[in-house]
Each structure stands twice: as C-alpha cells, then as structure tokens.
Amino acid sequence: MIRILTILIAALAIAGCADSEQEGIAGAWLDPDDKSIARFSEDGSLSVGGDGSDDISGNYTLLEDNQMRLDLTYPGVEPISVVVTYELRGDTLILIAPDGDKTRMTRVDR
C-alpha cells in the first residue's frame, strides 16, 4: 500500500478524457507487490486499501496525454491533489509517477 500511496502523492494538473477510457479503468486493481487494491469507480471516485480496509479515498479525473489527476484523502494527512501518467493494457494498469517510479497493477474485478 505504501508504494501506491507514494505513486499517488507525486504531482499536479487538470483537463478531460473520453468516457470509454474511464470505463476501461473502472474496477478493482491489485498491486501484487504490497497486496493493496485500488478501486476506480465509473463515477470518478477512488479508494485504496489492503486487508479489506479502504485507507485512501478520493476522486480521479482522466486528463489528456494519458494523465490522471487524483484528489486524495488519507487519514491524518491534509488532502492532496496529484497527477500521474497511466498506461492501460488490457487487464494491466501501470501508474507512473513524475519521478519515473512505476506501479503495475492487475485487474481483479470490473
């Protein structure tokens, strides 16, 4: 979970994207390294947690140029907005932080 939190708390920006791309990202994604699950809803809400708990919540917006803005709330921390680059390849979602750190996730549910 710390890896996803690190990726999600990396930068800033805004724009817009097609509904079909949002539908492609919607679902539950497992980070096999730390066993946390990120849940992206079609309505733009997001939660990330491990062991059945949702420790991070917020919203996401798909931007131009395969970027995603994340507005996140984490218990005990001020809300934060970040932008990551993403690659969606079938059932694999890769989040890329501005520093180049990548988190590769596998779809576990739609």
Image: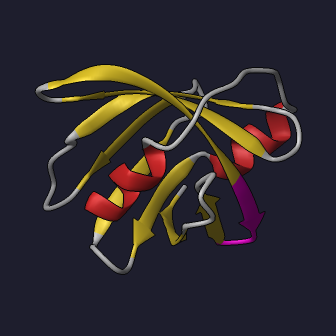
Q: Residue at x 63, y 51 (%)?
A: 98
Quadrant assignment for the C terminus = bottom right
Residue 69 can be seen in this image: yes
Foreground of the two, 23 or 11 = 11
Tell me if residue 21 is in the magenta stretch: no
Q: Residue at x 38, y 79 (%)?
A: 32
**Residue 46 at x, y percent in the picture:** 44, 35
Q: Which residues are magenta?
A: 86-91
Q: Name which quarter of the figure residue 79 lies in.
A: top left
- 102, above or below 71, in the image: below
Quadrant assignment for the N terminus = bottom left
Foreground of the two, 20 or 98 = 98
Q: Main secondary structure of the magenta part?
A: strand
- Relative horizontal placement of residue 75, taking residue 29 as reference (left or right): left
Q: Residue at x 64, y 72 (%)?
A: 92
- Relative horizontal placement of residue 11, taking residue 66 as reference (left or right): left
Foreground of the two, 32 or 12 = 12
Foreground of the two, 54 or 108 = 54
